[in-house]
Image (tube, rainbow, N blue to C red):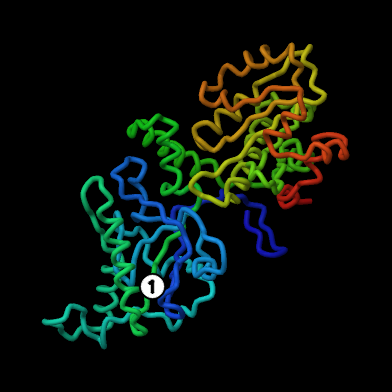
Amino acid sequence: MTDNGNHRTPIFEGLSLEEPSILTISFASDPTASLGVKLCNHDNGLTNEMFLPGYASVGGMLDGETLARKHGVKVGDYIVAVNGEGFRRFPPDFQDENLKDITEGLDLINLSVENGNGKAAGGQGEEMITDKEKEQRERDLKGRVVTGKKSGGEVYEKLLARIREIKTTKSPANPLLISLERYMWDSRVHSWSRFLSARNGNVPEAMTLIQGHERWRNEFFPIDLTEPSLQKLLKAHAVSEIDIESEEEKAPVVYIDFAKLQAMGVESDSLSIDVVKAFVVYTETLLSKSSDPRGPKTSQFVDLTGVSFKQGLQPGVLKKLYATFEPNYPETLEKMVLYPVPKIMVRVVNAMLSFVNEHTRKKFIITDDLVLVCKELGWNLKEIETCGSVNGYMKKHLKHGLSFVFD
């Protein structure tokens, strides 16, 4: 789904792409300035680095009015070139002219990295070349692949040395220019480490998993939000979200009103498919909002208020949600809370969830203690009490749900 101002389309496309956006950071206005970021070294010869485009990324932002903040740099951006010289792990899959430039506060029209007046760089032996040839050489140089020893950080150190060398010259005619690429949360650049972790570092198994996920994305999306049965579920907020700002930076929550789902006949195949679609829409939306695309997280809250345990908890829909979530969103779950569950029923509910793998079950909280729930999810207990229920609290903090409703 796209949302441009007040214009919305009822087709949810999924919220991640493989192609990056690009940024250019110029030091022309202050050659001695610091970029204002903490860099991460990705030149360690590790298998979780194999899809990273460069050898350094932004791991954190320094406080203050820095060049990075001025130009819109964010955590997770990758340095791929310095003054038009590539420091890449592999050639680019996309040409810059076909990518969206998201640089802020920079005059891109007057930005250039000229090496001469229509001549090839290189000192002696320079020859006259056409503009087209010059553009191709510059493109090739910016897309340059640099390799070093399997481990030891050789390329990372070369990158830093080149940045220091250019800054030291303080040349007005050749200011430091750092080219970065920004990838979305579910691109291979960011997701590969999650899939690898989910298969305990086994590369063939992780590759099989991520390829299956990519096929699933192609088949599952787009979702037509106007389907009547799906709209009924979305309007009822049987699947929704609780996305609040917390000092503890807790993950946003996908909310599931289990009693409402049961009342709607959740065990039927058609409705369970709609539940999965709604679940995916909210999961994608919340993960895409993460401030760090390298490790996006959500929590899940299953509201069991009003569910009769004597009649038996029907876990069928939870099985279907898990069958979608586990292979397609590995390592994105922070907490899974089922509430309220009487203490005498905790063991029974645990047994019903035996289909969940051991690693994921360690993230489960099955309880009737609202204080514990608020502690784990970063919720405000007094506010929930004022709202009268978790359901009321959800409706108060509904950020994205109304954009999915089409009358």
Give SS at disc 1: strand
- For the question of whether residue 392 can be seen, the reply is no
Location of mark 1 (residue): 177
Relative to residue 385, is residue 24 drawn left or right? left
Residue 390 position (above or below residue 111): above
The number of discs equals 1
Q: Looking at this view, name the residue that lies furthest to the bottom.
A: 117
Relative to residue 9, is residue 60 drawn left or right? left
Query: What residue sits 51% from the left and 35% below the top?
Result: 331
- For the question of whether residue 225 can be seen, the reply is yes
Residue 108 position (above or below residue 358): below
Q: Quadrant of residue 299?
A: top right
Q: Quadrant of residue 134?
A: bottom left
Q: Position of residue 143 (x, y in %)?
A: 30, 64
Q: Looking at this view, name the residue that lies furthest to the left.
A: 125
Q: Position of residue 44 (x, y in %)?
A: 30, 46
Q: Position of residue 201 (x, y in %)?
A: 37, 32
* Mark 1 closeness class: few <14, some 14–19, many ≥20 residues within 10 Å: many
Q: Position of residue 284 (x, y in %)?
A: 59, 45
Query: What residue sits 77% from the left and 29% below the top?
Result: 370
- The amino acid beneath tag 1 is Leu
Which residue is nearer to you in this view: 205 or 359?
A: 359
Query: What residue sits 55% from the left and 28% below the top?
Result: 323
